[in-house]
Amino acid sequence: MPSVAAQLEHLDVLIVGAGISGLGAAYYLRREHPQRSHAILEARGALGGTWDLFRYPGIRSDSDLHTFGYAFKPWRGERFLADGDQILTYLHETAREFGIERDIRYHTKVVSASWSSPDARWTVEVVNTESGARSALTCSWLLCATGYYRYDEGFTPCFDGRDRFRGQIIHPQHWPADLDVTGRRIVVIGSGATAVTLVPALADTAAHVTMLQRTPTYILATPSRDVLVIRLRRMFGEKRAHLLARALYIFRQQAIWRFCRRFPKTARRLIRRLNVRMLPAGYPVDEHFSPPYDPWDQRLCFAPGGDLFTAISRGAVSVVTDRVTTFTEKGVQLASGRELAADVIVTATGLNVQAFGGVPLTVDGEPVRLSSTVAYKGLMLSGVPNLAYMVGYTTSSWTLKIGLLCEHFCRLLTHMDAHGYDTACPVAADPALGTRPFLDFGAGYIQRVLDELPRQGNRKPWLTSFDYLGDVRLLRHLPVADDELRLSRSRQRAGAAS
């Protein structure tokens, strides 16, 4: 009698998530392995991931679009940092242009995945998010492109007195489409990228906006328009300008990151000097813009055209560095005793991290404990066969890493085809491999869940790298096979071969 798995729809590669990572993965599969069947499962009703979900005012990239966009799809805009609508349009254009749209199955959420070594395949249970109907399918490879945070809820600390506040409390992840802040007093709690984006956008119409932060963040002004790229286009045309700009911005990102890590005190002084130039004379820069950590211990934030500093200078925005004691009927009571009046409180307090979309994994009947696994090349997990994941850089453009991971994944498939393998599983050659947190990043949303994430090793290929040039060598040029990637033929493949 044929197995249940044999009766199910089978795909060579199943991609989970139709955001910027999943669309990129589909492109590379179509280009390098057009003979392979694949599909993209998307729990929501639209593509775009983050850029379709987040709709708060001012949402934009915090990396230039020549590196945040795909290498195969030139960015044609003139802004240095693009807003969310422009990015979403770019992703829709990409999906249409390369035929990726027809690969997407919307309203399809993965609820579990189990691996069978004898069959060399995953059985994936899914639910239709509209009807609730459950079904299953199988795949040879499961590729998780869901990012690393929860889409259904953001992180909000437990604030005392929350129920007493008479105004509106909003998390940016669930921004009301009909919210009008004209003439209203707004307190934005937080100082990360979301707050730095929101605050100047709200200040255009609000009566006043206060950015309330527990600790400061490093913030740098960037140009509004990408003057360099505009000039390159005039000189060399669009295609060559894209290649030149991409190379230049990759070099600049890496140079800034390396400089900050090697000379943190100097970097701190330079950032402070730039902030002083953008702010009113006598402004308490050290109180509000001098973090207690070094640059790139957490991600730097960028203000296009210096919009945040401009809003502060014209009196539309105040920055307060203090701790929340309680919410009151009229606003927020601070540890200093001061009360901030508000009509709207925005809790820009971060994200809830969720690895692999929260999907439970089992391998031959044994549940996978992510915290017991080690990341291999930033692409696979120790002891988990034929599972790949896409997590981009946190210190430069996310998509730079995604492109390299997709290339390497396709190279791995080619290598396996050439040698008749159907199973790939990372296994550390040294059982005593030293490990450290999955992401060496000081952001609170990462630190809260380190015990729930995979680990990374203390040497290559188990090291999760932030070095783009090093990753180019590892993922694009070095052989895909090594002593710590176990390649094999399943009984099913061996029987077919004989």
Image (cartoon, rainbow, N blue to C red):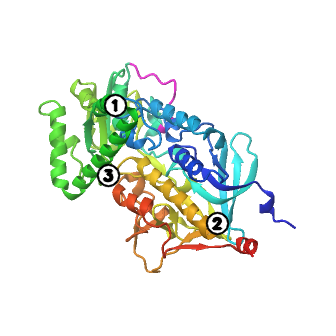
- Checking the image for residue 362, the label placed there is 2
**Going from the N terminus, do you reach mark 1 or mark 2 first?**
1
Q: Is residue 79 left or right of residue 491?
A: left
Identify the element where label 2 is drawn: strand
Q: CA distance from mark 2 to mark 3?
A: 34 Å
Point out the frontmost of discs 3 and 1.
Answer: 1
Side of 135 relative to 488 (left or right)? right
- Image position of 258 with respect to 52: above or below: below
Residue 397: mark: none
Q: Which amino acid type is shown beneath numbered disc 3?
A: Gln
Classed neighbour count for the residue bearing mark 2: other residues with Cα under 10 Å, few (<14), some (14–19), many (≥20): some
Residue 373 image position (x, y, % from top left): 51, 69
**Badge number at residue 298:** 3
Could one spot residue 334 in this view of the protein? no
Above or below — where is 316 with respect to 92? above
- Tag 1 residue: 233
* Residue 253: image location, x then y, percent: 30, 48
- Give the quadrant of residue 423: bottom right
